[in-house]
Each structure stands twice: as C-alpha cells, then as structure tokens.
Image: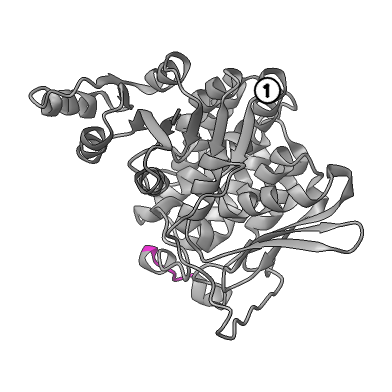
C-alpha cells in the first residue's frame, strides 16, 4: 500500500520538492492532503495533479477563489479554510505521514495534532520545536509518534546517530555555509540590502529562511531544535562554518570517532529520506564526484558579526517561553527588514531585546506560548512607530 501523506506548506520550496520526490517514486505515496496560506493558483495545480481528498488554505478569500476555480473541473477535493482547518485535516484524514513545512508558527497546532495522533511527522518547520519543543516531545513520548527531521543539518545528525547510542554522544556539529556575508565586515553589513541578503551561496530556499541564513539566526533556531530533537544539553551543540555545504552535519562520539553525512546541497535528499525512512530508494539528486579533487574548509563562526548564535544557545538553555519570544521577534524583524523599515544589523538586537524583556514561563502551555508570540511581534513592530 502506498504511504498516505499530508503536506502542510505544499506551495513553498519544501512542499514543492516533496511533491517532486513523490512524482519520481510512483506507487510509493498517495497525497491525501495539501495545505498552503494564500497561493491558491499554485495549490490548484497541485490538486489537479494529485487529487487529494482534502486541501486547506488558511486565507479564507483565497480558499473561496480556489473553490470557484475547481467548481467546473470535476475535482472532488474538499477545500477548507482557516488555521483551525489545518488541525482538522490532520485529525480527520486517514494518513501515515505528515510533512510539516509551513514557515513560522502557523503550522504549530497542526504539527502538535499530528504528533498526538502518533503519526510519523517530517519536521521541516523548525519553529515547531523552537517554540514548543517540550510540548511536542512530551506528546511524542505519549503517542509513540516518530519525529523525522527534514532540515539537512538535523537529517544528517539523525542519520549519523544510527551508528551510536545516545549516551555515547560527545558533541553535535551543525554545519553552516556562512551565508552571503561570511566574509563581510561589520561596516559592510551595516549597508546590506535585502537583495544582498538573498544571495545565498549554496542553497535555494524561501526568502525568510535565506535572510535567517544571512544573520545566522537559522543556526540559532537549529541549536534550539537540536536540543529538543536529540535530547542533548545546549553546550554539546556547536556550529561550524563549512562554505562548500558538502558535509551537512556531524556527530562526535566518546571514542573520538566523528561521523558525517555528506552529499550535494539538494533538499530533495533529506526530504526523500524522511518520506521513506528507514529505506533508501534511488533518487535523481546530484552525486558527489570524488574523481575530482574536493576541497573542504572549516572555520569557527565570528560571534561579533553573528551574535544570533549566542541567542540560540541562551534560548536552548532557558527553554520555556524563550523559544516563542526568539522566533516571533525574529519573524517580525525579518519582515520589517524585507519592507525596508529597519537595517540588516537591526534584526538581531531587536530579537535580543524581546528575549530579555518577555514574561518568562519555564513550563508554558500552548495558550501561553501563543501569548508570548503575539507580544513579541507587537513589540518589534512598535519599534518603527516610536
């Protein structure tokens, strides 16, 4: 029987790649649910191709346009709208695997619903664990849900950990390309534009995560995600700059061995592994050519130019509501930067200010996390009106 799959965030880069993987493995998967935010035109094409029983657009107006578009097509896909419909689709649709790939906190409730159902969950939405790591891991322990990381770095660690026991871990290494500003001075970064920040040297990603890569806030979020996903203290998680993006991350064990997962920088590889785990099926992604001399370089990140990393370790150590404050403030600050309201180097200080001032709760419920999320966004947006 094909594996029944729901894709949350199907019109984004991860969602599109996942559907491409499914197309290249005929008979392996049945798409039973698709969800997006506002892009009804792209979703309409995906529905016509895969004919899922259900689809969701969180934007009601976009959902209505999609229904009108599909009304004469003979398509029987039910189109639901609103954020609550994401949860409903996950709870009510017979499925085996949910790919959580909605950017930001929007997909948190649906991800938590999938975990509570005991489903296999592919985590491409790092914000779920950053914001609600304790809640999600507790739910997974109770339901038996399997959390399979899709981020290339966490997928690499997940795969490398198959060669050792948890109590044998000495250190986790998250590799980072260094982004477009790896060699820029602080003075140069003061005048960095959105166009500059979007010039990622190795990966093709959405705009928000590409800017996060430029500030290295993406690594800060990944530190928090790794702390929850792999149940290790933050001090054992280290970021290493690796410009070639060939080694996707590494695990050091107590015997001195370091195991790394390598490959071309192609997100279809970790996506496919999450979908087929523990099987490894043939894929059309690129191959490393060892007949050519492959040079790999490593360097420590500069804490002066990339202070976001310090916030990642601090947030991972604090737990509680710290992740909600960090994530929401960063999303709001990135939005302001993209709209030309603040400079590039204003992003991280705004995030740190919210982290410092938020009402910290060490063991919050979902309602408290959403309260902190809303507060942090409002605080950041107010900075442009003062």
Residue 101 spot, x, y in % from top left: 46, 39
Q: Is residue 191 magenta?
A: yes
Q: Indicate whether 292 appears above or below 78.
A: below
Query: In which image quadrant can residue 305 be found?
Result: bottom right
SS assignment at label 1: loop
Position of residue 189 in the picture relative to residue 241 (left or right)? left
Q: Indicate whether 274 appears above or below 241.
A: above
Q: Indicate whether 25 appears above or below 215.
A: above
Seen from this angle, which residue lies furthest bottom? 293
- Quadrant holding the C terminus: top left
**Residue at x 60%, y 18% (from the top left corner):** 116
Q: Main secondary structure of the magenta part?
A: loop
Q: Is residue 98 magenta?
A: no
Residue 226 spot, x, y in % from top left: 69, 45
Position of residue 143 in the picture relative to residue 317 (left or right)? left
Q: Is any part of residue 376 visible from this angle? A: yes
Q: Indicate whether 80 appears above or below 348.
A: above
Position of residue 10 in the picture relative to residue 352 (left or right)? left
Q: Nearer the viewer, residue 20 or 37?
A: 20
Residue 364 spot, x, y in % from top left: 68, 22
Q: Nearer the viewer, residue 228 or 32?
A: 32
- Quadrant holding the N terminus: top left
Identify the colour scheme used: one colour
Q: Nearer the viewer, residue 362 or 60?
A: 60
**Residue under numbered circle 1:** 144
**Residue at x 61%, y 47% (from the top left corner):** 221
**Magenta residues, start to end:** 190-194
């Amino acid at each position: 029987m094909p594996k029944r799959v729901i894709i949350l965030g199907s019109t984004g880069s991860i969602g599109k790649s996942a559907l491409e993987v499914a197309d290249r493995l005929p008979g392996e998967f049945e798409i039973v649910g698709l969800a997006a935010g506002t892009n009804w035109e792209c979703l309409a094409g995906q529905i016509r191709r895969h004919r899922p029983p259900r689809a969701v657009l969180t934007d009601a107006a976009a959902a209505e346009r999609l229904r009108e578009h599909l009304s004469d097509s003979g398509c029987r896909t039910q189109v639901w709208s609103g954020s609550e419909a994401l949860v409903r689709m996950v709870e009510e649709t017979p499925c085996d695997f949910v790919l959580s790939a909605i950017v930001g906190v929007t997909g948190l409730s649906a991800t938590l619903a999938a975990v509570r159902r005991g489903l296999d969950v592919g985590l491409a939405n790092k914000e779920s664990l950053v914001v609600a790591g304790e809640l999600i891991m507790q739910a997974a322990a109770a339901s038996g849900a399997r959390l399979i990381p899709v981020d290339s770095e966490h997928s690499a660690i997940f795969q490398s950990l198959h060669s050792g026991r948890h109590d044998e871990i000495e250190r986790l290494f998250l590799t980072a390309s260094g982004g477009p500003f790896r060699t820029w001075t602080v003075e140069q970064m003061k005048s960095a534009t959105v166009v500059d920040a979007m010039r990622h040297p190795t990966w093709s990603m959405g705009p928000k995560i590409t800017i996060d890569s430029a500030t290295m806030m993406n690594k800060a979020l990944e530190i928090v995600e790794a702390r929850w996903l792999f149940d290790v203290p933050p001090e054992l998680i280290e970021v290493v700059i690796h410009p070639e993006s060939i080694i996707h991350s590494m695990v050091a064990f107590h015997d001195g061995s370091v195991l790394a997962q390598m490959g071309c920088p192609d997100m279809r590889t970790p996506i496919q592994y999450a979908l087929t785990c523990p099987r490894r099926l043939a894929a059309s992604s690129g191959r490393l050519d060892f007949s050519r001399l492959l040079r790999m370089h490593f360097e420590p990140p500069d804490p002066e130019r990339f202070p976001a990393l310090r916030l990642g370790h601090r947030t991972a150590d604090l737990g509680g509501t710290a992740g909600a404050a960090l994530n929401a403030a960063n999303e709001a600050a990135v939005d302001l930067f993209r709209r030309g309201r603040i400079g590039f180097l204003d992003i991280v200080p705004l995030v740190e200010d919210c982290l410092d001032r938020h009402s910290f709760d060490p063991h919050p419920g979902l309602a408290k996390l959403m309260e902190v999320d809303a507060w942090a966004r409002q605080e950041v947006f107010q900075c442009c009106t003062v």
